[in-house]
């Protein structure tokens, strides 16, 4: 079992420090995403008129907190699929902070600009931004990930975080049986990224592994996929 788990290191998008980081990126009016590099660049933050910062990490510094002119929210989460439950529990807090910052976080009570970041602006921060857009604009998992990746192609949340978004979809009232999001194919894409530049295994083997990932266990701290989501949807509908 340990040997098989070791082959699934791609589940986390951490450890890709050598890949080129795209800088601070505007997602919608007043909302930006990026990585540690942009978070530590005072001039870049000022150019974007950033007033609020969501730091989705446990170890990246709140670089300018002592200056007193930027509002910070730390969400201490590691980029690992087992943190799926934890990132899910942060969605409401993040939504409230982002909404407040965008609406009245600027000078003289005017709207402010919010910057959400993790280390590379690819998984943790992307998940928080995706959840905000789903809650605020009614976007689906498929729709929000497609939108974000058009703007910032490096975005690729780990599987546990995507399952957290799938659960949020259910909480927002969407029947998972109507979803256009194919989680197994998403897992295949993650596998392709992992084996990029190597002798990648065949499509059949990639799909076999993806199907295994589609059935994660609660014992590992992951949110089970379709069957559990359908049960959760029925439970939510009866409230």
Image: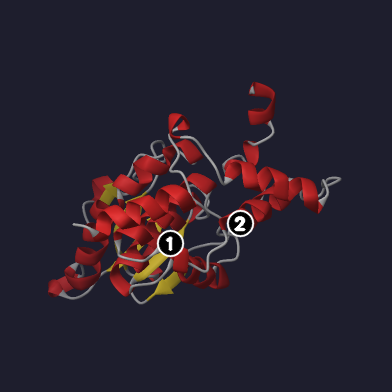
The reply to whether residue 70 is in sight is no
Q: Residue at x 71, y 45 (%)?
A: 208
Element on which disc 1 rests = helix
Asked if residue 131 lies left or right of residue 71, the reply is: right
Q: Residue at x 42, y 39 (%)?
A: 83
Residue 169 coordinates in the image, percent (x, y): 37, 61
The reply to whether residue 212 is in sight is yes
Element on which disc 2 rests = helix
Total marks placed? 2
Q: Residues within 10 Å of mark 1 (few under 14, many from 20)?
A: many
Q: Nearer the viewer, residue 104 or 143?
A: 143
Asked if residue 144 lies left or right of residue 110, the reply is: right
Residue, far left? 108
Disc number placed over residue 176 in the picture, else none = 1
Q: Residues within 10 Å of mark 2 (few under 14, many from 20)?
A: some
Residue 141 coordinates in the image, percent (x, y): 45, 64
């Amino acid at each position: 079992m340990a040997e098989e788990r070791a082959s699934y290191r791609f589940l986390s998008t951490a450890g890709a420090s050598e890949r080129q980081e795209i800088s601070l990126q505007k997602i919608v009016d007043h909302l930006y995403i990026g990585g540690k590099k942009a978070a530590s660049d005072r001039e870049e933050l000022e150019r974007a008129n950033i007033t609020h910062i969501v730091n989705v990490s446990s170890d990246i510094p709140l670089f300018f907190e002592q200056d007193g002119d930027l509002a910070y929210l730390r969400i201490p989460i590691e980029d690992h699929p087992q943190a799926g439950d934890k990132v899910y529990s942060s969605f409401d807090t993040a939504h409230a902070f982002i909404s407040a910052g965008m609406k009245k976080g600027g000078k003289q009570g005017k709207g402010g600009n919010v910057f959400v970041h993790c280390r590379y602006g690819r998984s943790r921060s992307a998940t928080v931004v995706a959840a905000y857009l789903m809650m605020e604009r009614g976007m689906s998992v498929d729709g929000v990930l497609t939108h974000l990746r058009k703007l910032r192609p490096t975005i690729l949340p780990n599987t546990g975080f995507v399952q957290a978004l799938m659960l949020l979809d259910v909480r927002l009232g969407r029947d998972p049986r109507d979803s256009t999001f194919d989680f197994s194919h998403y897992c295949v894409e993650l596998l392709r990224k992992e084996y990029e530049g190597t002798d990648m295994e065949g499509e059949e083997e990639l799909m076999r592994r993806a199907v295994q990932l589609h059935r994660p266990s609660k014992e590992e701290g992951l949110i089970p996929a379709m069957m559990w989501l359908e049960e959760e949807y029925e439970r939510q509908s009866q409230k």
